Image (cartoon, rainbow, N blue to C red):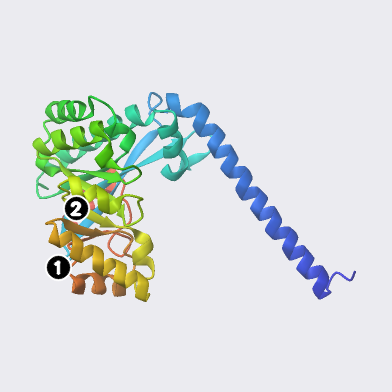
């Protein structure tokens, strides 16, 4: 077969795609293996760090909150995305000490920012349902708030829907105790969970976060209908609405017109390292 023939070129292209697929799969396997073996000691070795993504009021474009996002700087694999290691942390129950570290670290950080004058900013943290299944989770959060002297009214905990909260006594109990402390509770990635509507029946949720998959192609008839419905539903139950993954002005303008309360995404800001946040505060 001639090297410059169409058949040869197609075959070579196919080989390259296969090689790319293999490289990608091998990297994924390596990440999984490293995560499983090294996750346990990573906290002690201080390999985790937090970034903070600003959240803006849609109407005023003023920053009102920061979402804490965990990253893992592995000594061999470099920075690992949480999508790679959070499922393993949940599987091994290491999500409990890891989640506690996130709450403690981010509360200390935001309190430090409050002390230098940025007092209107709140803090948003993702938590796992596995954390909420701990008997003393709410008690542990209160201890962290007391120790860090962080005002609980500035804290919002985001739950990714993966189980029916209504049928889980410990989860419901922890959420009730957290709300007694004035901690806010939100549903993250709303609309993608299995029990998103049934969970709303038994909980007074403060915020619904629209998943980025609905924002990505907001011009789509189906996506715009879903977004409109979530905004309407949220406001009917007195919950604020935050849209994630806003990257374009067109998306922002649509959400503003429909009454979405808050926005986060690269259109406004990427996640920031702590040393970048103060400069960002001063600009906004």
| Residue 103 image label | none
Indicate left or right for 185 with 269 as reference: left
Mark 2–mark 1 Cα distance, whole angstroms, equals: 17 Å
Q: Is residue 253 above or below residue 244?
A: below
Residue 284 seen in the current view: no
Q: Which residue is mark 1?
A: 59
Residue 210, by quadrant, is: bottom left
Q: Secondary structure at mark 1?
A: loop
Q: Nearer the viewer, mark 2 or mark 1?
A: 2
Contact, mark 2 vs mark 1 (Cβ under 8 Å): no
The residue shown at (24%, 31%) is: 170
| Residue 207 image label | 2
Q: In the depicted view, which residue is nearer to us: 172 or 24?
A: 172
Q: Is residue 223 above or below residue 112?
A: below
Residue 174 seen in the current view: yes
Q: Residue furthest right?
A: 1
Q: Residues within 10 Å of mark 1 (few under 14, many from 20)?
A: some
The residue shown at (33%, 29%) is: 96
Q: Secondary structure at mark 2?
A: strand
């Amino acid at each position: 077969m001639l090297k410059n023939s169409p058949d040869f070129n197609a075959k070579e292209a196919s080989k390259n795609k296969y090689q790319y697929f293999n490289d990608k799969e091998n990297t994924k396997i390596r990440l999984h293996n490293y995560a499983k073996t090294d996750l346990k000691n990573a906290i002690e070795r201080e390999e985790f760090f937090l970034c903070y993504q600003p959240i803006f009021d849609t109407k005023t474009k003023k920053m009102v909150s920061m979402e804490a996002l965990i990253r893992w700087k592995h000594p061999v694999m470099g920075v690992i995305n949480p999508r790679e290691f959070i499922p393993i942390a949940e599987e091994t129950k290491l999500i409990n000490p890891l989640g506690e570290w996130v709450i403690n670290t981010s509360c200390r950080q935001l309190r430090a920012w409050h002390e230098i004058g940025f007092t209107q900013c709140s803090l948003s943290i993702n938590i796992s349902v596995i954390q909420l299944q701990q008997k003393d989770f709410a008690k542990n959060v209160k201890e962290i708030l007391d120790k860090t002297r962080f005002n609980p009214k500035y804290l919002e905990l985001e739950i990714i829907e993966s189980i029916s909260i209504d049928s889980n006594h410990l989860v419901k109990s922890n959420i009730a105790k957290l709300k007694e402390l004035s901690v806010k509770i939100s549903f993250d990635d709303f609309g993608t969970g299995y029990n998103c509507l049934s969970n709303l029946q038994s909980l007074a949720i403060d915020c619904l976060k629209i998943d980025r998959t609905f924002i990505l192609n907001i011009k789509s008839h189906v996506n715009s209908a879903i977004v409109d419905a979530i905004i309407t539903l949220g406001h009917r139950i007195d919950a604020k609405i935050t849209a994630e993954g806003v990257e374009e002005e067109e998306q922002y303008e649509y959400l503003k017109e429909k009454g979405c309360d808050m926005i986060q995404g690269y259109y406004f800001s990427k996640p920031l390292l702590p040393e970048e946040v103060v400069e960002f505060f001063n600009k906004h």
